[in-house]
Image (cartoon, coloured by chain):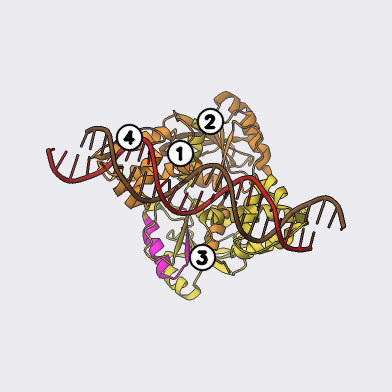
Chain colours: A orange, B yellow, C brown, D red
Amino acid sequence: MKKGKVSNAVIRRLPRYYRTLDTLYREGTVRISSSALGESMGVTASQIRQDLSCFGEFGQQGYGYNVADLRQALSDILGMNAGYTSVLVGAGNLGRALMRNFHFNKNGFSLSAAFDVDPKIVGTVLNGYPIYSMDSLDDYLAEHKPSIGVLTVPKYAAQSVAERLIAGGVRGIWNFTNIELDVSDSNVVVESVHFADSLLTLSYLISE
Amino acid sequence: MKKGKVSNAVIRRLPRYYRTLDTLYREGTVRISSSALGESMGVTASQIRQDLSCFGEFGQQGYGYNVADLRQALSDILGMNAGYTSVLVGAGNLGRALMRNFHFNKNGFSLSAAFDVDPKIVGTVLNGYPIYSMDSLDDYLAEHKPSIGVLTVPKYAAQSVAERLIAGGVRGIWNFTNIELDVSDSNVVVESVHFADSLLTLSYLISE
DNA sequence: TAGATTGTTAATCGATTAACAATC
DNA sequence: TAGATTGTTAATCGATTAACAATC
């Protein structure tokens, strides 16, 4: 779908474009110009037009962008309609918080199952998601071939579980553990949510 | 403490420098050169030296950097030793996951209390942190003047709670809600953890 | 001392912004 | 049509990398 080399800076802005367009769409806004969109997001109109031009032509001279169409285009670009599937490994506090609160479906990912070592929760169902034993992870991966694995295990288990996920064929790991995963397979993408980095950035900013 | 204008790109790299140095420190590494550090982090030695030069001189020609000293310097730069305090608002799944698993102290923030609307948990203590009623939030802020507020409330409550935190004098908000907070006070910093943006970035990357 | 490695200046590269012809 | 706004090219700005004198 994508063409040419899209810079990381652009890629990181795409979700926010989508999110803003989605809000406008839900509010019933029909059209918006790059300058109005830029104003509302605190970026320049030039940047928006330049960024979008990496993927095609979505606007119309003299009119701007149709909100519904651009939202749809962005969701396609982001792969939200590709039918990606996911499994979650580690149904502790954070894993359960994601299972209960995070809208996987709204973001294009169906979550099919969770895995944990704790026999007290293995076999239960949380918010509609079954929790299976870690022992069955590898067989499950082989059978269902999920696109990504959500990694919410304790730190010490992170690397070994990541390797099992990769051996099982996932294409991406959504990493919530605070370690740098050592992933040699260059076809597997790791996206990390580093809570501590975020808090320390805030700490720096309030220190200035 | 900081001098001059430090670019956002540099600021965002600081926590990772700290994290890497901390790991080296715990492993007992005494000294490291910018090239060795760069190699292990996947960045150039030039960038590390250039970044650090924003804050002072921490190395020694022919030797490199003393790991313990540089780690300490980074923690100072990040404000980890400034005695910052925090409160958490919204003790739902995510809030409780943070209270149980996130090491506030290791990151220089003492968490003094949590607040929630649910009468079933108000008055309880979780992992040593007392959970108080939302009704008492404003008085608590006035009395204790925490540095930051951790915002883990439901979406619909986010903006109004943020305003109460700001009125109560916090200098920063660590925002886990998926909305763009409208903060007019330019002295208050908002740092957001956008789960959906992170997952959508991963989605894009595996689509390539 | 000789070798290593810093901090910093200069060169390069890439990303953002400005400008404008095309055109709805 | 006239006004508005795009997509894109050119100009600017900023960030990264390379080079090297200083020096431990």
Sequence-first disc among 4 and 1: 4
Q: Comparing marks 3 and 1, which lies closer to the viewer?
A: 3
Q: Is residue A57 left or right of residue A175?
A: left
Tell me the distance, in whole angstroms, between the alpha carbons under discs 1 and 2.
13 Å
| Labels 2, 4: one chain | yes
Q: Please provide the residue range marked out in magenta.
A: B157-176
**Residue A206: numbered disc:** 3
Q: Is residue A181 visible?
A: yes
Tell me the distance, in whole angstroms, between the alpha carbons under discs 4 and 1.
27 Å
Q: Is residue B113 visible?
A: no
Residue A161, image quadrant: top right
Please tell me how crowded label 4 is: few (under 14), some (14-19), or many (20+) other residues with Cα within 10 Å.
some
Image coords of residue B13 (percent x, y): 58, 53
Which chain does the residue under circle 3 lie in? A
Q: Comparing marks 2 and 4, which lies closer to the viewer?
A: 4
Please tell me whether residue B165 belongs to the stretch shown in magenta. Answer: yes
Sequence-first disc among 1 and 2: 1
Which chain does the residue under circle 1 lie in? A
Q: Is residue B5 left or right of residue A54?
A: right
**Residue receiving disc 2:** A147
Tell me the distance, in whole angstroms, between the alpha carbons under discs 2 and 4.
29 Å
In front: A4, or B87? A4
Dot 4: element:
loop
